[in-house]
Image (cartoon, coloured by chain):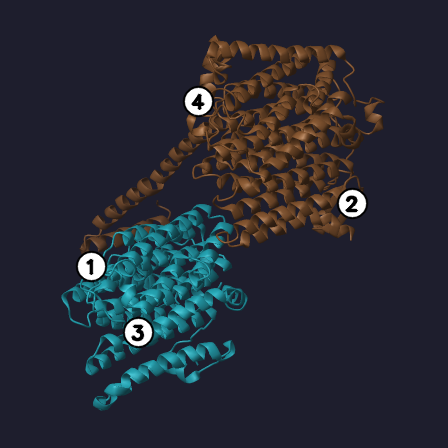
Chain colours: A cyan, B brown
Amino acid sequence: MPVLLVLVPLAAVLILNLPLHRIMCRFAFWIGVILCLVQALLVIQLPNAVWNGPCQVAIRLLRVTPAVDNLSLVMFLSIAIVTFVTLLVARYTISDCGKLFNFTNLVILAMAGMNGLVMANDLFSLYVFLEVAAVASFILIAFDREKDAFEGTFKYIVMSAVATAMILSAIGLMMTVTGSMSFNVLSSVMKTDGGNPVILLSAALLLGGLFIKSGLIPFHGWLPDAYSAAPSATSVLLAGIVTKTTGVYALIRVVTMMHLHSHTMQTLILVVATLSIVIAAFAALGQSDFKRMLAYSSISQVGYIILGLGVGTPLALAGAAFHLFNHAIFKTLLFVNAATVEKQSGTRNMDTLGGVSDKMPVTGFTSVIAFLSTAGIPPLSGFWSKLIIIVAAWKAGFHWYAFIAILASLLTLAYFLSMQRRVFFGKLASGLEDLKEGNPWVLIPACMLAAITIGLGLCIPWLFGSFLLPIRSIL
Amino acid sequence: MSILLFMAPIIFPVIAGIAILMLDKKRNEQMCAWLAFLATAANLLVCASLFNKELSLVIPWAGLFNFEFSLRLYHFSSFILLASAGFGFLISLYSFSFMNGREKINQFYSYFLITIGLVNGAVMADNLIVMLFFWEGLLLTLFGMIVIGSKVAFRTAIKAFVISGVADVCMMAGVIMTIHISGKMNMSEIHQLPISSVTAAVAFILLMIGAIAKAGSMPFHSWIPDAAVDAPLPFMALVPAALEKLVGIYFLSRISLDLFKITEHSMLSTIMMTVGCITILLAVMMALIQKDYKRLLSFHAISQVGYMILGIGTAVPAGIVGGIFHMINHAMYKSCLFLTGGAVEKQTGTTDLSKLGGIVWKMPVTFICFAVAAASISGVPPFNGFFSKELVYDGALERGRIFYLAAVLGSFFTAASFLKLGHAAFFGKPSEDKAAVKEAPLPMLIPMITIAGLCIFFGVKNSFPLHTFIQPILGEHMLEGHDFAGWPVNVMLVVVTLVVIIGAVMNHIWGVEKGGSGLHAADHIHDAPILHTLYDKAEQRMFDPYEIGMKIARWVAQMASLIDKAIDYVYNTVVVESAYAVTGFVRRLHTGSYAVYMVWSLIGTLIIVLYLLGKL
C-alpha cells in the first residue's frame, strides 16, 4: 500500500511527460497539488493497519518491502504539506507556464524520492531514494540558471558526492560483514557484533555521510549557499523537507534501526548536535541576507532534533520527531515569507529592508508567529517540542547539553528579533513606498502554516498522548 | 437596629465625605460646608447617644482564617468617640469661615469626614486586623489633607506618609506577633499577656511604636512642624492636635492596660517613660526658638505627647489617669490654640511672629481664648492642664526623680515659650498695616470660646471628667481606692509647679529686657554656648530622622543603581560584544570556498572514524 506513494508520483511524472505535454502543461501544477493533498488526507484518514497491508505487485515490481510506522506517517504528512506549499510558492514566483511545468515535474520526482526514503526498510533502498531526491533538488537549485545558483548547486553536488561515497563505502563494508542490507539483520548484527572494527568503520562512514546530508556543523559548508542561492520555491522545499528527509530522517532511521546507542555513539551525536546549535546560531546572528540567515537557523534547529536523537530515550525521540515536524512547518513558513518579501521588494538584503510589516501585514504577522515558534515561546508548537527535548535530555542526565540548549534558545530569539526588527518592524525603508502585500498564492499557505503552528501548540495536551508517545514504537 | 446604630459613626461620615467629593465645587462651596457641618452634627448626636453603652457586634468574615469583623463599644471607646465627634463638630463650624474661598474645598471636607469615620472605626474595632484596616486608612486622608494645603505641600505630604507608613508597618508586625502569641484576634479576648518572652516584649514595642507615632511622639514627629506651615489650619487643629492624639494614646492605653501586663519597674515601662521625657524636652526646646505661630504650636503638639506617654509609662494609677486626662486636655487646649492661630492668620494674613504684634485690642476674644489655652498648656492653676500635669508629676516622682525633673523642666520651657508667643503675637508695637484688623467672625469664635470654656470647666470642676470619663477606664481594682479628683494631694508638687511658672515669667521679663521685644525673649537660650550649635544643626534638619533616613535611602539607591549598571553592562555590553565577536569569527571561517568546506567534512568524518574505533 505505501508503495503507491512512490509509484503514483513516478507514474504522474511519466504521464505528464508523454508527447502530449503541450496539453499537460496546464494540468501539471494541479496534478502536483492534488497528489500532495491526497497524501496528506491519506495520512490523516487511514488507520495504521492499512499502511502495513501487503501489496504483492509493488514488492515484485520494486523489490522492496516497505515499513511504515508512526514516524514515517509524520514524515509523509510533512512531505505532503511542504511540497504543497512549494508548489503554491512556485506558482507565485514562476510566471512562465513551461518553467512551472518543469518545476512541478522535478518537485513531484523529489516527492517520490522522499516518500520512498521514508518507507525504506533496508539500507540500500534508503540510499537509492536519497539519491533520487538529491538529484531532483540539484536541478531545482540551479533552476533559474543564475551564477550564484550554479555555485550553490555545485557545492551541494560536490559535498553530496563525498557523502554518497561515504555511504556507499559503508554499505559495501556492511555487505561484506553481514551479507544483508535489511535493517532487521543489521540491527541483530550490531547487537551481537557491535565491537567489530569493520562494522564500526562502516557506521562511522555512514554517520559522516548522513551528517553531510543533514548539513550539521562542521559538515554544513554547502547548505547556506544552496539555500540562499536557490530560487525561492526551491529554498522552501529544500529547507522545509528535502534536507530533513534525506539527512535528518535518514539519520534517525539508521541510528534507531541499527541500534547505534552505545555511549560513544551518543556522545558523538550530542557533541555534533550541540556544535550545530551553538555555532549556527552565532553565524545566523551575523547574516544580512534573509535566506542565508534562515539557512543557519535551519542548521541550529536541526541541531535540536539531533540532540533529541542523541539522548535516545523514548521521550527524547518523540520530541525530536515533533520538532522535525514543527521545523518543517515554521521554517517553511519563514522561507515562504522570505520568498514573498523578495518577490515584492526585489531584495533579500535585510539592511535595505525595514518596516515591511506596514505594507505587508499578513506576511509580517505570520513571520512573527513562525519566529516565536522557532525561538520556543509558549504556547506555540515550537516551545513544546523544544521543551520535550530539553526535559528529556535533563532526565537522561545530560544536564550540560540541556543547559546549552536552553541558552542557545536565547540566541535564537536574538537573531530572530534582529531579523524582525530589520525587515518587518520599525520605519519603512526608503524605496519601499510602493510595496504591496503578496497575492493569495503565498498568503494562503502562510496563514495555513501559521494556523498549524498555533493549533498544534494549543492542542498539545491531546497530541502528546495520542500522537507523540506512540513514536516510541520505533525503538 | 443596634447594628445600624453601631455602624453609623463609621459609615455615615464616609458616605457624606464621598458625596461631598462628588459635588461640583465651583458652585457648591457653601453646600460642601453645610453638608459637612450637618454630618458632623449628626455624628456628634449619634456618638453622644452611644456614650457609656456596652455593645458589641460580630460578623463572620473570611471564614478560612477564622476571622471576624468585630466591633466593640464600651466605656473607653465611647469616650473617645464622643471626644472626636465633638472636635469634628466644632472644627467643621470653624471651617465655615476659615476655608471660605479656598481651593479644593470639597476635597478638604471630604477627607475631613472620611477621617472622622475612620477614626470612629479604629476606636470601635475589636478585632486587631479590623483596627489595622481603619488605622491604615487614616494614612490616605492624612496625605490628602496635607497635599491640598498649598503647591509645595506635596513634599510634606510624602514625608508624613513615609513616616506614618514606617510606623504602621511596625504596628502591623506587632499585631501579627500579638495574634501569634495570644492565638486570638479580638482585643477583648486578649487579657494582659505577660511580658515573659522576648517575642512578647518585641510585640509590645512594635505596637507601642505604632501608637506613639500616631500620637506624634519623637522620633516620628518631624512631619508635624512642616505640615503646620503647609497644610490647611483646621486640619492641624483636628488631626495632629486632637484626633491623632486621641487615637494614638487610646491605643497606647489599650496595649499597656489591657493587651499586655506592664508592671512597675519593668524594662518596657522605663523605655516608655524615657521616650516620653526625651520627647517633652527636645520638642519644647525646639518650640522655644520658633518664629512662626503655627510652627511653634506644632512643636508643643509633639512635646505634650511626651507627658501622656510618660504618664501611661509610669504604670502607676496616678500616672495613667494623668496621662489619659492629659490626652483629652491637650486635645482641647491645643485645638483651641491652633484655632486662635487660624483666626490670627485669617484676619492678619500672616503667622510670622516678627510681622505680628499689637493686635490684642483688635481681637480681644481671640486673645482671651489664647490666654486660657496657653495657661492650660503651661500648667497654671486652676486650668485643666495643671491638674493633669500634677497627676503625671505624681506618677513620675513615684518612679524616679529624674523623670520628674525632666517633666518639670519641660513645663518651664513650655511656659516660657507661650509667654514669648503671646507677647510677640498680641502685644508689642502694632505695625501700621495691621490697623484695619478686626475680630474673627462668629463661626470661628464659637468653637474657640466653647473649647476655652471647657478648659476652665475641666480644671475648676475636674471631678466631672475624672469621674465620668477617665477613672472608669482603669476600673476600681486598678485605682486601688484612689480618687484623683479635686485639688492635688501633694502640696510640695504644687509649690514646685508654681515656682517653675514664676521662674518662667521672670525668665521672660529678663529675656525681654535683654532682647528688646517679646519675639526675642528666648534668644538668650537660643544663643547659649553649646545650645547655639545644636540649634543651628536642628534648624538645618540634621537631626530629622526622616532626612537621615532619606539620606541613607538615597545612598542605598545609588549603590543599587551602580550594581544595576554593572549588571546592565554585563548584559548590554559584555554579552553582546562577545556574541558579536564569536559571530564575526564564525563568519570569517565561512570563506565560501567549497574546498575548505570539504576539508572540514573530511576531517570531521576522520575524527568520527577514529573516535568510534577507539583510537581517540
Cα distance in 3D space between marks 3 and 2: 76 Å
In this view, the mark in front (3 or 1): 1
Q: Tell me the residue that label 3 is attached to.
A: A442
Q: Is mark 4 on a helix, strand or loop?
A: loop
Looking at the rendered structure, the kind of residue marked 3 is Val
Secondary structure of the residue carrying numbered label 1: loop
Q: Mark 4 lies on which chain?
A: B
Q: What residue type is labelled 4?
A: Gln
Mark drawn on residue A352: 1
Gap between marks 3 and 1 measured at Cα:
22 Å
Three-letter code for the amino acid on which mark 2 is drawn: Ser
Q: Which of marks 4 and 3 is in front?
A: 4
Q: Earlier in the sequence, mark 2 or mark 4?
A: 2
- Front residue of B339 and A200: B339
Between the residue at mark 1 and the residue at mark 2, the CA separation in whole angstroms equals 78 Å
**N-terminal-most mark, 3 or 1:** 1
Q: Is mark 3 on a helix, strand or loop?
A: helix
Q: x, y (%) of residue A123?
A: 37, 67
